[in-house]
């Protein structure tokens, strides 16, 4: 039974659910997972997260399907990516089995917050690990906390997915051998100023180019790019400093194995962008945000798909993936994990 919430009026913001899952790392091991109603974090004033930004996170969703089940989408990949991110920042990793156990525990405890099928809303899940122990010399924290929280969020596109306008940023998102390929809090902090600047100028997002040569497309502050060529091929940029988006990886499999489209993951020169027929930004929150225009320092790149609606190929990809997530389209084996 779902809570009595006006699901259609929800935005994408924090709304505390009843329970969250917590585990503490001390003396070389993680404690047993616990459910708690306490939404306040208690840490040292000299905690590693406060001194040296030692924190990594994930984002995924739980859905209520057409037949009433509660499911999550490929959470094993979130578990693996959180592990990879943690190891890169010298944070003890949470084992995949522990991650999935926490997910089941959290969603089951808060199942009244999982929106009804067809409402457009979902339960957003945010797992994260941070350095909780005190450290003042530049070193990893001695203690950590793993938390998994959740909140109901509204449909990302209210009234339909209208194409957005983005700009080419003069800032770099990540260095070639830096942390661009992991989900570290510091990566997102780096994009905040440039993001606010883009919004103030009337743009929805930034397009970041590679930091070494500034000639190849990387990603935005929080989403991977997806391009469609004029002959229907699906192309996504390849780089060691791009976050391996689970949505993007899934869309490429949908394109090739379900829709029968040709796909290609390769470096994408910025000078090639005007030749594409469609463009989208893909990530957990929106699945795909269609891009209608890119502003390159006053010069506009306008995609043939236009500013009124998603291009035809991106719409097929969007409809198919959301159908798999909601249980109306058969997806590859192992993609859907039911919460029982």
Image (spheres, rainbow, N blue to C red):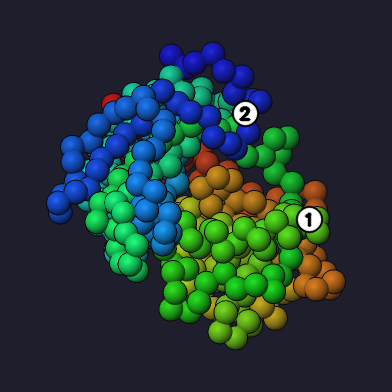
Q: Residues within 10 Å of mark 2 (few under 14, many from 20)?
A: some
Residue furthest to the right in view is 298
Spot occupied by residue 210 in the image (x, y as percentages of width and height):
57, 78
Relative image position of residue 303 (x, y in whole percent): 76, 64
Rendered residue at 50%/62% (across/down): 187
Q: From the viewer's perspective, is residue 21 above or below residue 302? A: above
- The answer to whether residue 127 is visible is yes
Please indicate whether residue 20 sits to the left or right of residue 99 in the image: right
Tell me the residue at 48%/61% (across/down).
Answer: 186
Question: Circle 2 is placed at which residue position?
Answer: 10
Residue 281 figure quarter: bottom right
Q: Is residue 74 visible?
A: no
For the residues carrying marks 1 and 2, which lies nearer the camera in this image? 1
Which is nearer the N-term, disc 1 or disc 2?
A: 2
Which residue has dot 1 on it? 200
Q: Is residue 57 above or below residue 216?
A: above
Label 1: which secondary element: helix
Q: Name the spot of residue 177 as percent of width and height, x first.
A: 43, 78
């Amino acid at each position: 039974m779902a809570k009595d919430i006006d699901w259609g009026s929800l935005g994408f913001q924090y709304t505390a659910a009843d329970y969250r899952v917590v585990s503490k790392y001390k003396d070389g091991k993680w404690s047993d997972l616990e459910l708690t109603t306490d939404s306040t974090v208690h840490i040292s004033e000299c905690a590693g997260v406060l001194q040296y930004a030692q924190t990594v996170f994930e984002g995924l969703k739980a859905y209520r399907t057409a037949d009433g089940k509660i499911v999550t989408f490929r959470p094993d990949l979130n578990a693996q990516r959180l592990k990879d991110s943690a190891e890169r920042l010298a944070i003890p990793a949470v084992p995949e089995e522990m991650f999935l156990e926490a997910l089941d525990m959290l969603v089951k405890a808060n199942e009244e917050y999982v929106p009804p099928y067809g409402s457009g809303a979902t339960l957003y899940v945010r797992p994260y690990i941070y350095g909780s122990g005190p450290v003042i010399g530049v070193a990893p924290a001695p203690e950590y906390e793993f938390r998994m929280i959740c909140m109901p969020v509204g449909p990302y596109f209210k009234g339909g997915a209208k194409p957005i306008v983005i700009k080419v940023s003069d800032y770099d998102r990540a260095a070639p051998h830096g942390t661009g390929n992991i989900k570290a809090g510091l990566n997102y902090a780096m994009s905040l100023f440039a993001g606010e600047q883009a919004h103030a100028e009337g743009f929805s997002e930034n397009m970041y180019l590679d930091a070494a040569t500034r000639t190849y497309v990387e990603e935005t502050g929080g989403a991977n790019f997806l391009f469609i060529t004029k002959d229907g091929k699906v192309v996504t940029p390849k780089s060691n400093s791009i976050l391996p988006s689970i949505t993007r990886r899934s869309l490429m499999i949908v394109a090739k194995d379900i829709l029968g489209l040709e796909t290609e993951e390769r470096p994408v020169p910025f000078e090639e962008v005007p030749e594409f027929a469609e463009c989208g930004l893909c990530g957990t929150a929106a699945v795909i945000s269609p891009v209608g225009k890119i502003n390159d320092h006053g010069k506009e790149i306008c995609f043939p798909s236009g500013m009124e609606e998603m291009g035809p190929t991106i719409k097929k990809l969007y409809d198919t993936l959301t159908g798999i997530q909601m249980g109306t389209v058969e997806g590859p084996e192992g993609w859907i994990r039911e919460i029982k």
